[in-house]
């Protein structure tokens, strides 16, 4: 596949199976593609996750979204995780900023089958905001691996009852795209309603407090 996403690198990366299934692919989005996508990235001035149909962006960002929804992307994940994802609904959300309250330990909702995170920050010098895959729900420092949200890195994991993750507090710009395969269309509609309601609420807050980033 010729495009923004380096599926050959994804296929060549072994799946880590314990304590839950995950893999990390640095440079999954290469430097040239990263620059093009970031130039067309949605301008998001508030914290939180926004469905991609609720934000504006340019053509390079749309090209990346099309690749995420493509058959080759899905087939690579099916092969890696040994799952049948054909016909499963998907949701893509985007973040532009992080709040100091973000990053609390969680596993993701049971409606999610696979979570894919694409980090779009050109560099990352902060101690906070680095996602940690954890061994338990109790200790953010008991981590399997820590992933700086940088330079087109992909992090993907199969949602499970022990897929704990979180990060140290950080407030500021932190670009990440989240793509999920979900268990059912009903769960997709619920997720979209929740995200749309949250996005609308954040926009109201932004108008009430225009000086707050």
Image (cartoon, rainbow, N blue to C red):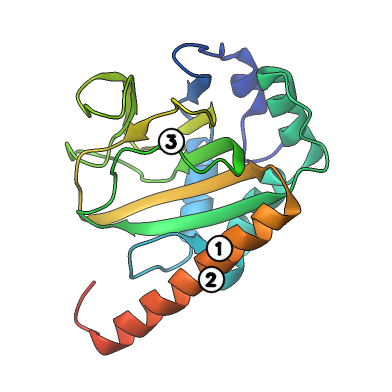
Residue positioned 61% across, 56% down in the render? 60
Residue, disc 3:
107
Mark closer to the observer (2, 3): 3
Q: At 72% from the left edge and 35% from the top edge, which residue is drawn?
A: 73
- Examine the rendering and report whether any part of residue 145 can be seen: yes
With respect to residue 210, does 156 lie above or below?
A: above
| Residue 122 falls in image quadrant | top left
**Distance from the alpha carbon under mark 1 to that under mark 2:** 7 Å
**Residue 174, percent from left and from top:** 32, 51
Quadrant for the N terminus in the image: top right
Residue 55 visible, this orientation = no
Q: Earlier in the sequence, mark 1 or mark 2?
A: 1
Residue 173 image position (x, y, % from top left): 29, 56
Residue 116 in the image: x percent, y percent? 55, 37
Query: Which of pointers 1 and 2 indicates the residue nearer the eye?
Result: 2
Distance, label 1 to label 3, CA atoms, is 20 Å
Element under disc 1: strand
Q: On the rendered structure, is 124 left or right of 118?
A: left
Which disc number belongs to residue 196? Answer: 2
**Cα gap from disc 2 to disc 3, whole angstroms:** 22 Å
* Label 1 packing within 10 angstroms: few (<14), some (14-19), many (20+): many
Height in image: 63 above or below 127? Answer: below
Q: Nearer the viewer, residue 211 or 103?
A: 103
The residue lying toward the viewer, choosing from 194 and 92, is 194
Name the residue tied to disc 1. Answer: 51
Badges 1 and 2: C-beta atoms under 8 Å apart? yes
Looking at the rendered structure, the secondary structure element under dot 2 is helix
Assign the C terminus to one quadrant of the image: bottom left
Sort mark 2 into few (<14), some (14-19) or many (20+) by Cα contacts within 10 Å: some
């Amino acid at each position: 596949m010729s495009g923004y996403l380096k599926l050959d690198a994804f296929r060549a990366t072994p799946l880590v199976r314990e304590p839950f299934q995950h893999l990390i692919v640095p440079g999954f989005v290469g430097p040239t593609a990263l620059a093009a996508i970031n130039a067309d990235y949605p301008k998001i001035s508030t914290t939180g996750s926004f469905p991609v149909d609720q934000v504006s962006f340019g053509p390079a960002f749309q090209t990346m979204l099309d690749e995420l929804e493509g058959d080759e992307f899905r087939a690579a994940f099916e092969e890696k995780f040994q799952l049948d994802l054909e016909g499963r609904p998907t949701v893509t959300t985007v973040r532009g900023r992080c709040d100091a309250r973000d990053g609390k330990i969680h596993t993701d909702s049971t409606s999610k089958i696979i979570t894919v995170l694409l980090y779009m920050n050109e560099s990352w010098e902060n101690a906070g905001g680095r996602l940690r895959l954890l061994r338990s729900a109790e200790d953010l420092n008991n981590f399997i691996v820590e992933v700086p949200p940088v330079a087109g890195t992909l992090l993907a994991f199969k949602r499970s009852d022990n897929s704990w993750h979180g990060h140290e507090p950080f407030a500021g710009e932190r670009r990440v795209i989240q793509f999920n395969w979900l268990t059912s269309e009903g769960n997709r509609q619920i997720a979209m309603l929740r995200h749309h309601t949250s996005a609308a609420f954040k926009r109201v807050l932004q108008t009430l407090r225009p000086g707050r980033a």
